[in-house]
Image (spheres, coloured by chain):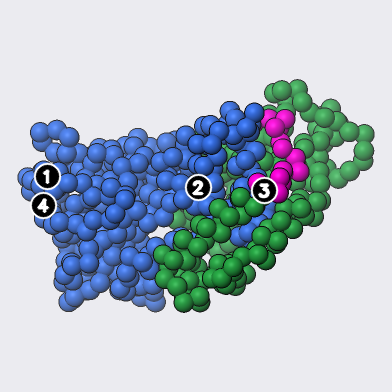
Amino acid sequence: MSCQPTWAERIRHAVAGELDASAWPALRAHLRTCAACRAAYDRAGDAVAVLEGRPGGAPEAVRGASRAALFAALDAQAVPPIDVEGPSDPLAPSAPRARSGRGLWAGLGLLAVAAAAVMLWPANPQIDLEKPGVGFTARGGQLPQVGFKLFCLDVAGDAPRIRSVAAPLGPPARCAASDRLQFTWSSTLDGPQPLQIFAVGPEGVVWFWPPADASGLEGPATDRPLPGSFSAPGAAAGHYRVYAVAGATLAEDEVEAWWAAGEGRPEALPGQVMHAELEVQ
Amino acid sequence: MPLEQDAELLARFRAGDRGALGAVYDAFADPLARLIRMGFRVQTADGLAVIPPLTSLFEVESLAHDVFLRAFAPAARAAYDGHRPYINYLMRIARNLRIDQFRHDRNLVFTDQPGEIEQPAVAEDDLIDRELQGLVRAFVAQLGEPDHSYYDARYRVGGSQTQAAAACGLTRIQGRRIEARIKHGLIEHLEAHGHQPRRQGEDDELPTHLG
């Protein structure tokens, strides 16, 4: 019995790093039950690993998918979703930059709903930059200078609410795929300052802020909303890491290159780096 | 390996910091996979048992998944002393999982051959599929330009996609396309030459799965 062409095609894309993250669980489920496809997967994967100079290991793409599956499983064993009933600052959305083929941005109608929802909330508990792990420290510096928060907004009902919130080094935010994401940032620095926020999943960078036409941020700031409202990454269940980079200007291509280099480590990024975790369920 | 040498990383690892867990995973996933592929012999109460090598990439990744899932549990993180090589800690979990699987299915094979306790069942050098390496070398040798130059810059020099593309005077997007083309071409090359893994592993017991 041979591996059916549709599965064989997915296997080729998987080991070549072209399979969408949302397609990996189905592929794994099939491989568990189909010896022919498993042999094809092993054959292709071993060969690509040799090509990449890591014989006996896994291809970069397989390693990335395995890593994502591991963290998703760890999260599933962890604490239940955070139920944040606290209020938030209003966030003023603006039209985000579209990224072709990935469906990362929801329609403007939903954007308006999310904006209206968060406008209803009064003051937000401020980010305590002195709290360990909340802000991040410039290399060679002593005090945290910038911090950010990630909010998952449940906009399904008549009265949108914050479903979950995450800050760096804290528990993950847990979003439904239909949620909107919004951010606040804080900085102890004066004047204009670069800030990039982006999310990576098993297949790499899934979205990036700011849009090309965004104006710079002016500090100091405390829990200031970032312009924009975002759909959950790729609308695919899974684990995502949301990075913030301050003190350096990065283009989206540079961020994608950082990920594609197989590093995926904050140390490999310039400037001041921190990250929060996001679980899309 | 970073965990034994980096006290700050160890502290964050024990605290369950996601970044630290990711760094540990990145450092140990491939070494663990290679050890899992080697199989091992282990002394049990019933004699010296042979746990055969796992030769399937899928099964290796699946077992590694279960190993890390256990190793990253709070109790296991706290139990690691920070001094002994962490790869040994991981491999001990892997051995126990494999032994449990074989015991469950009454598939443990005992041997009268003397040997070191918990020694690998095969030498690491035996893991190298020389036929596969030869096929990959032949495939790379016939690459045209700019694919061959990109391959050199990406995998022989070890550059990122952006660096490899720049070395060839290409954009990153062009480099990414070339990389995908090379990998697809390699798979077709293997199929055309009828390469099969040395051991299919289809008789191996599947460990619990990736999620």
Callouts 3 and 2 in the same chain: no
Q: Amino acid at mark 4?
A: Pro
Badge 1 element: helix
Residue at the location (28% across, 38% down)? A176
Query: Does the rendering let one see residue A137?
Result: no
Task: Tell which circle, 2 or 4, labels the residue nearer the N-terminal end.
Answer: 2
The chain in green: B
Magenta span main SS: loop
Task: Tell which circle, 4 or 1, labels the residue nearer the N-terminal end.
Answer: 4
The reply, left or right, for residue B112 in relation to residue A7 is: right
Q: Nearer the viewer, mark 2 or mark 4?
A: 2
In the rendered structure, find residue A13 and report the number of the disc placed on it.
2
Residue at the location (42% across, 45% down)? A21
Q: Cβ–Cβ below 8 Å for labels 1 and 2? A: no
Is B98 rendered above or below residue A120? above
Region of the chain picked out in magenta, as a range:
B191-210
The reply, left or right, for residue B99 in relation to residue A150 is: right
